[in-house]
Image (cartoon, coloured by chain):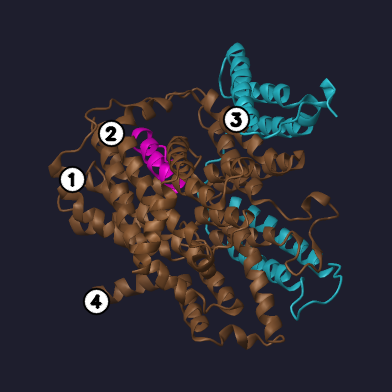
């Protein structure tokens, strides 16, 4: 079958020394970075983008490395969450529900091992699903014109807004803010300078790396500064580093179910690993928790979120690669990275550059195997990194951020901008505004506007083009559903109980 | 309180934005929508959302003690100073100082902080300049142009 041939080609590509090295380096770097509290895959990818430029890596190799980083950091996040109850990013918060109690009971080893194994299982299952469904989605995607794309972006937005955090209004505000940021600079049709106040540096608009690093990494430095300065991280004793066969089989169905739900959630633009992990944990708890062990150190409570968030990570690559729509904040960063490398993800990616897509899929296989082999023996070593005191760790984070940002345009202005966003991110975190929608807004904004204006140019200002095709209508319905999903679920539950 | 303050600030922002997009100078008309519409629509949306925010129940915000605020402010200032002096002092000197300062504020003893500053900057300099080939400023103080 055509797909198998392409997959085989993909393996051939990913076995090239450069790409193997890229996966390896990405996986290791990702894991280490994932373990640094607060610095997540978004930061890692954002900081390393200038480096891929500097190394003149091909787009294929670059995205292979990014994917390696993405996975690696999922693993890394779990490590710091389980050992220290410091989630690397939001997607590993749920892992700590049972992981941290396990660590305190001296079962840190099995917890870490299960997290590695569940992540592996989740990714593998998701990759199979990806192989089956990606070409299908790609074929369907060619029927998307600018009007359909516009509605798709709207849908991506509503889903994110209604699923992130408890506060829809704040999430929407963050998203709108991100959209507003994206309008700074020259407009997509090249007609007017917007909100630049005559500043040359803003002519091209805001650089998303600057905004991302500022909002996430720098705000984390401020946040860390505020929490106790003299607090030293204590690592709990690590017992055996493997799980028993019994524990594995007890968690098998959990991992499979969570991988399925995680993958599907990941495919929906806007949803992502965090939501997937919450949903999986809640599902498994409802299905399996007979004696109230969930939340007190049940190993299945670690398996569920770990399997689903990795599956979601794979799933979120589908909309990004086949439709050019990011499935989550991290893929939004990857998307922007690809765009700046001159690759346009979208339905034509599979046609014009199949080697990028299939090389990526094949290297995901390899990457996951490498990560599993790497993690199990190296866990004790990784844990020691967390013993590095804050007064070395935080300056390191800050300095890497400076270099990462400065290297983009050699401009001190960007450092000021980054610092400003750092302050903003810090304030936002304190007042309960989610950060990820801002990034999504920043990345999607231009696409949204460009497609809207193009669609209306075709129709000579006739708004009905946005509702013309069946695809567009379906997407509008999905967007409305996405916006009111929590309310619908609530209503559904009430009706079900009656 | 924080919700109210945030809402008012956002409201002001949306009004400013609205004004700015209204007075935008458009070079020529390219399409039926034009460059003003989306920013104005966004500003309008923000306006509505901030009104909603204003009436929302307040979250429990753990505001840091004044001492901690001062700390954050000081580090913020140091970042800005770093940015301004980077080209002048050159990467090595500026970064060593900055990293040492941050390290010190995070609780390291003075000497240790200096060492950390030097160590981190040197390690990163080697990594970025020699291994990755990214050029970092040498500093006009030392004669670079």
Report helix, strand or loop for mark 3: helix
Q: Earlier in the sequence, mark 4 or mark 2?
A: 2
Is A219 magenta? The answer is: no
Marker disc for residue A498: 4
User: Which of B64 and A320 lies nearest the eye of the viewer?
Assistant: A320
Q: Position of residue A488 (x, y in %)?
A: 39, 73
Q: Secondary structure at mark 1?
A: helix
Report which residue position mark 1 lands on: A248
Q: Nearer the viewer, residue A364 or A333?
A: A364
Which mark's residue is nearer the viewer, 4 or 3? 3
Q: Is residue A239 above or below residue A431?
A: above
Residues drawn in magenta:
A70-90
Who's the residue at 32% across and 48% down the image?
A119
Residue A402, by quadrant, is top right
- Which of discs 2 and 3 lies nearer the camera? The answer is 3
Question: Label 3 belongs to which residue?
Answer: B131
In front: mark 1 or mark 2?
A: 1
Q: Which chain is cyan?
A: B
Choose the circle earlier in sequence order: 1 or 2: 2
Which residue is tagged 2? A103
How far, Cα to Cα, is label 1 from label 3? Answer: 43 Å
Distance of label 4 from label 2 (alpha carbons):
41 Å
* Parent chain of label 4: A
Along the line of sight, the residue nearer the viewer: A202 or A301: A202
Q: From mark 2 to mark 3, how far is it between C-alphas?
A: 39 Å
**Magenta segment main secondary structure:** helix
């Amino acid at each position: 079958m055509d797909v198998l041939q392409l997959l085989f080609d993909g393996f051939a590509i990913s076995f090239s020394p450069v790409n193997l090295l890229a996966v390896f380096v990405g996986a290791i770097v990702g894991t280490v970075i994932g373990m640094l509290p607060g610095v997540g895959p978004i930061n890692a990818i954002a900081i390393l983008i200038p480096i891929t430029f500097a190394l003149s890596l091909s787009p294929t190799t670059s995205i292979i490395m990014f994917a390696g980083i993405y996975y690696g950091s999922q693993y890394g996040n779990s490590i710091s969450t389980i050992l220290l109850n410091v989630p690397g990013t939001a997607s590993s918060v749920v892992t700590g529900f049972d992981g941290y109690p396990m660590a305190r009971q001296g079962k840190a080893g099995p917890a870490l091992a299960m997290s590695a194994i569940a992540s592996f299982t989740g990714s593998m299952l998701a990759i199979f699903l990806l192989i089956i469904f990606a070409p299908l989605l790609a074929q369907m995607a060619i029927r998307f014109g600018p009007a359909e794309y516009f509605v798709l972006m709207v849908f991506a937005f509503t889903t994110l807004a209604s699923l992130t955090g408890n506060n829809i209004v704040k999430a929407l505000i963050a998203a709108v803010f991100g959209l507003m940021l994206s309008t700074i600079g020259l407009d997509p049709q090249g007609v007017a300078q917007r909100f630049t106040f005559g500043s040359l540096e803003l002519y091209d608009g805001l650089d998303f790396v600057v905004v991302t690093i500022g909002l996430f990494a720098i705000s984390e430095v401020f946040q860390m500064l505020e929490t106790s300065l003299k607090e030293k991280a204590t690592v709990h004793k690590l017992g055996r580093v493997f799980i028993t066969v019994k524990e594995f089989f007890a968690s098998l169905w959990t991992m499979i179910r969570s991988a399925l739900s995680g993958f599907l959630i990941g495919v929906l633009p806007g949803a992502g690993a965090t939501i997937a992990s919450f949903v999986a944990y809640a599902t498994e708890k409802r299905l399996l928790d007979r004696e109230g062990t969930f939340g007190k150190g049940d190993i299945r409570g670690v398996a569920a979120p770990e399997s689903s968030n990795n599956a979601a990570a794979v799933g979120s690559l589908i909309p990004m690669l086949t439709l050019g729509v990011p499935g989550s904040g991290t893929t939004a960063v990857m998307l922007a990275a690809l765009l700046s490398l001159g690759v346009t993800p979208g339905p034509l990616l599979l046609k014009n550059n199949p080697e990028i897509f299939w090389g990526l899929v094949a290297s995901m296989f390899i990457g996951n195997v490498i990560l599993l082999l790497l993690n199990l023996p190296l866990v004790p070593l990784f844990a020691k990194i967390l013993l590095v005191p804050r007064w070395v760790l935080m300056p390191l984070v800050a300095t890497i951020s400076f270099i990462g940002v400065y290297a983009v345009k050699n401009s001190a202005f960007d450092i000021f901008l980054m610092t400003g966003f750092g302050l903003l991110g810090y304030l936002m975190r304190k007042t309960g505004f989610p950060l990820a929608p801002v990034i999504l807004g920043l990345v999607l904004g231009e696409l949204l506007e460009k497609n809207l204006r193009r669609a209306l140019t075709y129709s000579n200002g006739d708004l009905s083009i946005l509702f013309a095709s069946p695809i567009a209508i379906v997407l509008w319905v999905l967007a409305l559903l996405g916006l009111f999903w929590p309310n619908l679920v609530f209503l559904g539950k009430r009706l079900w109980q009656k | 309180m924080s919700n109210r303050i945030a809402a008012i600030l956002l409201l002001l922002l949306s009004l400013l934005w609205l004004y700015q997009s209204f007075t935008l100078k458009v070079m020529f008309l390219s399409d039926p929508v034009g460059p003003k519409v989306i920013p104005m629509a966004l500003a309008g949306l923000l306006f509505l959302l901030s009104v909603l925010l204003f009436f929302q129940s307040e979250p429990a915000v753990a505001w840091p003690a004044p001492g901690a605020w001062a700390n954050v402010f000081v580090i913020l200032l140091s970042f800005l100073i770093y940015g301004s002096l980077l080209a002048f002092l050159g990467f090595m000197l500026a970064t060593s100082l900055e990293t040492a300062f941050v390290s010190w504020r995070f609780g390291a003893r003075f000497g240790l902080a200096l060492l950390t500053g030097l160590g981190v900057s040197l390690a990163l300099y080697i990594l970025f300049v020699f291994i990755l080939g990214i050029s970092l400023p040498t500093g006009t103080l030392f004669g670079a142009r």
